[in-house]
Image (cartoon, rainbow, N blue to C red):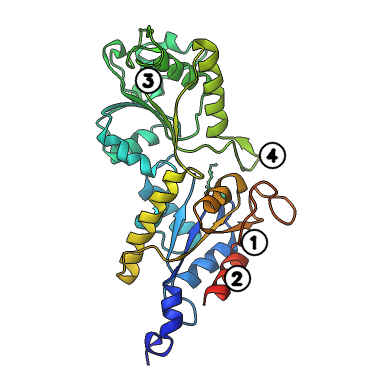
C-alpha cells in the first residue's frame, strides 16, 4: 500500500508545515558545509519514513550574484537540490523596482556581478560606480583606478543622465568612493551629476538597500561590518551635509515586506511539489541571527528556532529577541524537534 493510503493523517500534517532556512550560520559558513544542514535537507527532500517531501524555502540576507549562480553553488555545497523557485536572497524582491525605474545606480558586490543581477531583473540602463569614475576620475580623489577597470567600465557624460534611483545591492568594496558618489547623487537635482539641488527633499532621488545587517560573520574572529553599518554612515553624512534626514527603503530580513514575499514563494513552491497553492499553517524559521531571522519571524507569526552555529553566542535564549520555539545546538536538532511536534 502507498504511504499516502496507510498514513493519510500524517501526510496531511507533513503538508501543513514548512521550513524557512537562513543560509549563513545555519547551513553553511561561507563555502563550508555545516554537516547537519546536508542531513536535514535529505530528510525534507523525502528520505524519511513517509517518503514525503516536506516543503522548505531558503531566505537569506546574502547578496552579490545572480540567483542561478548562487543556487548552483549551494546545490554543490549542500549536496541537495536548491531550486531558484525556493530561493530568496536580499535583493530578489527588488526585481519589482525595474517596473518603476529605468536608469539606476547599482552599488556593491565583486566586479560587475551586481550589474549582471540588475540586468536579469529587467533594469534597462544600469550604471555602476566604475562607469562614473571612468568618466571623471576627480569625483573619487583617493581612488586608484586601474587600466583593467577602465577597460571594463562604460563611461559616458553623466552630467546629461538623470539617474532615477540608487540601489545598494551588496556590500561596498570601496566605502570612500561609493559614499562620495551616492552623496553626490542624493544632493543632486534629479540624479544628474554636476548639479546641486536647491531643495534637498523634493528633488532627491530615492535610495534602496537590499538588507540592514550591521554585522556579518566571516573568517575573521570578530564579525565584520555589513550593509547596515554602511547605511548608517551614509545617513549621518547626509544629515550633517544637508540638515535633513535621509529617507530610505530597506529590504531583507527583518523587514515585513520580505516575509510577505516569502509567503508567496512558499505558496508557489507548495504548488510545485504538492499541487496545492497555499501557505502551510505551521511555518518554522531557522536562523542564527536574533536581530534579523528571529525578530522578523516572531513579528510575522512564524515559529522561530535559533541555532548556535552562527552569530548567536548567548545563553539560554536571546534576551532582546528570544526564539519562540527554542534554541538548538544546530539545524538538525531544530528540524527534528519541529517534526516531532507536528507529525
Ligand atoms: O549578513 C549578510 C549575509 O551574509 C547573511 O546571510 O543567510 O545569514 O541571512 P544569512
Ligand atoms: Mg545567518
Q: Which mark is residue 207?
A: none
Residue 256: % across, % down: 46, 45
Q: Is the CB–ligand 2 distance for label 1 below 8 Å?
A: no
For residue 185, what is the image quadrant? top left
Task: Measure the C-alpha gap from mark 2 to mark 1.
Answer: 10 Å
Task: Measure the C-alpha gap from mark 2 to mark 3.
Answer: 54 Å
Q: Residue at x 60, y 52 (%)?
A: 288
Q: Residue at x 40, y 19 (%)?
A: 147
Q: In the image, is 85 to the left or to the right of 14?
A: left
Task: Measure the C-alpha gap from mark 2 to mark 4.
Answer: 31 Å
Task: Measure the C-alpha gap from mark 4 to mark 1.
Answer: 25 Å
Answer whether residue 89 is visible to the viewer in this image: no
Q: Residue at x 59, y 52 (%)?
A: 25
The quadrant of the picture occupied by the N terminus is: bottom left
The residue tagged 1 is 326
The residue tagged 2 is 337
Q: Nearer the viewer, mark 4 or mark 1?
A: 1
Q: Which badge, 3 or 1, is on the more N-terminal residue?
A: 3
Q: Is the CB–ligand 1 distance for label 4 below 8 Å?
A: no
Residue 262 drawn above or below residue 198: below
Q: Are marks 2 and 1 in contact (CB under 8 Å)?
A: yes
Amino acid at each position: 500500500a502507498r504511504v499516502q493510503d496507510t498514513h493519510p493523517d500524517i501526510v496531511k500534517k507533513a503538508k501543513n508545515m514548512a521550513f524557512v532556512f537562513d543560509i549563513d550560520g545555519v547551513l553553511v559558513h561561507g563555502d563550508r558545509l555545516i554537516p547537519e544542514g546536508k542531513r536535514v535537507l535529505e530528510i525534507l527532500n523525502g528520505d524519511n519514513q513517509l517518503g514525503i517531501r516536506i516543503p522548505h524555502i531558503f531566505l537569506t540576507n546574502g547578496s552579490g550574484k545572480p540567483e542561478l549562480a548562487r543556487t548552483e553553488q549551494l546545490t554543490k555545497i549542500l549536496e541537495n537540490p536548491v531550486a531558484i523557485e525556493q530561493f530568496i536572497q536580499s535583493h530578489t524582491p527588488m526585481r519589482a523596482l525595474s517596473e518603476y525605474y529605468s536608469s539606476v545606480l547599482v552599488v556593491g558586490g565583486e566586479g560587475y556581478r551586481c550589474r549582471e543581477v540588475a540586468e536579469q531583473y529587467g533594469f534597462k540602463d544600469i550604471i555602476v560606480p566604475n562607469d562614473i569614475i571612468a568618466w571623471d576620475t576627480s569625483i573619487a580623489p583617493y581612488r586608484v583606478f586601474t587600466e583593467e577597470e577602465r577597460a571594463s567600465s562604460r563611461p559616458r557624460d553623466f552630467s546629461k543622465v538623470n539617474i532615477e534611483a540608487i540601489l545598494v545591492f551588496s556590500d561596498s568594496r570601496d566605502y570612500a568612493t561609493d559614499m562620495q558618489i551616492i552623496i553626490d547623487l542624493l544632493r543632486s537635482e534629479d540624479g544628474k551629476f554636476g548639479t546641486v539641488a536647491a531643495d534637498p527633499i523634493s528633488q532627491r532621488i530615492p535610495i534602496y538597500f537590499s538588507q540592514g545587517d550591521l554585522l556579518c560573520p566571516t573568517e575573521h574572529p570578530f564579525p565584520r561590518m555589513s550593509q547596515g553599518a554602511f547605511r548608517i554612515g551614509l545617513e549621518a553624512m547626509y544629515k550633517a551635509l544637508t540638515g535633513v534626514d535621509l529617507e530610505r527603503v530597506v529590504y531583507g530580513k527583518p523587514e515585513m515586506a520580505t516575509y510577505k514575499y516569502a509567503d508567496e514563494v512558499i505558496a508557489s513552491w507548495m504548488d510545485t511539489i504538492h499541487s496545492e497553492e497555499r501557505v502551510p499553517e505551521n511555518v518554522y524559521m531557522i536562523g542564527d541571527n536574533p536581530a534579523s531571522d528571529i525578530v522578523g519571524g516572531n513579528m510575522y507569526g512564524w515559529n522561530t528556532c535559533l541555532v548556535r552555529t552562527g552569530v548567536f553566542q548567548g545563553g539560554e535564549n536571546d534576551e532582546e529577541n528570544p526564539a519562540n520555539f527554542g534554541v538548538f545546538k544546530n539545524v538538525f536538532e531544530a528540524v527534528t524537534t519541529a517534526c516531532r511536534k507536528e507529525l
